[in-house]
Image (tube, helix red, strand yellow):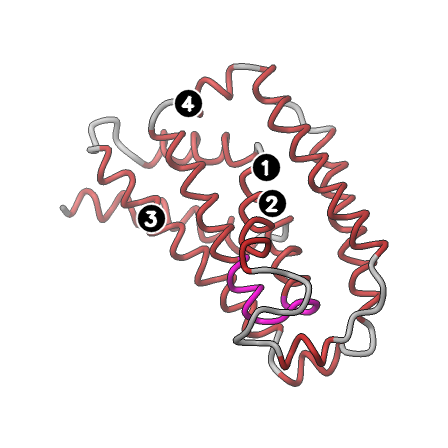
Amino acid sequence: MEAYLLELASLMAIFSFAIISPGADLAMVMRQSLVHGRRQAIITSFGIGTALMFHVSYTILGLGLIISQSITLFNIIKWCGVAYLLYIGVKALRAGKADLSVAAEADGKDAPGQSALRAYGLGFAANALNPKPVFFFLSIFSTAVSAHTPILVKFSYGAVMASCLIAWFVGVSIFMTTPRIKAGFSKASQWIDRASGLVFIALGLKLAVQKAS
């Protein structure tokens, strides 16, 4: 048991930096918070956490190694991710001015124009279509986790990481939808969409030039 706790501590020491690093997931949650409200942002956070378990699962089952060794599979995942990021980026750029006060009042209920399923799907797709976790989880599991560690224990490590990721983004969602923060952005909703759109497009272009290593 002590050995497993040490392995988990090693994983979390590495993963904690990945959680807070800027990326498509953070941009997605921030935009959801400011444009669609707290509940939608929290649901999106759960979508991101579920996608992380998806990455962990195929890494543990050995599919991650196959993907990392196959340029074709890597490129399929990569270009799907590029297309998705560019799509949501362009859509954000074309969005009109949103009434953030309506989104604020909708916290605790479904925000107008976006279902809970769509909010969840946005988070899941943003994370699942990113090929970088293939190499990230392969590297940290191969260096910090023993090959003799039972599969169930490895899945429990993944569950802890997913829970921490969800907790982080739920915290971001709550912070970004506090009255003071919301008021600060309420007059700039269109610029928020434009800025987030440019971020998504930039991330998509960055992913487009990324090569399997």
Q: CA distance from mark 2 to mark 3?
A: 19 Å
Q: Amino acid at mark 3?
A: Ala
- Quadrant housing the C terminus: top right
Label whose residue precedes the other's in the sequence (4 or 1): 4
Query: Could you say which quadrant of the image residue 145 lies in?
Result: top left
Q: Which mark is residue 159?
A: 3
Q: Amino acid at mark 1?
A: Asn
- Residue designated by label 4: 63
- Residue designated by label 1: 130
Q: Amino acid at mark 2?
A: Ala
Q: Which segment is the magenta one? A: 33-44
Label whose residue precedes the other's in the sequence (2 or 3): 2
**Nearer to the camera, 79 or 138:** 79
Q: Amino acid at mark 4?
A: Leu
Magenta stretch: dominant secondary structure: helix
Q: Position of residue 204 (x, y in %)?
A: 73, 39
Q: CA distance from mark 3 to mark 1?
A: 19 Å
Q: Is residue 158 part of the magenta span, yes or no?
A: no
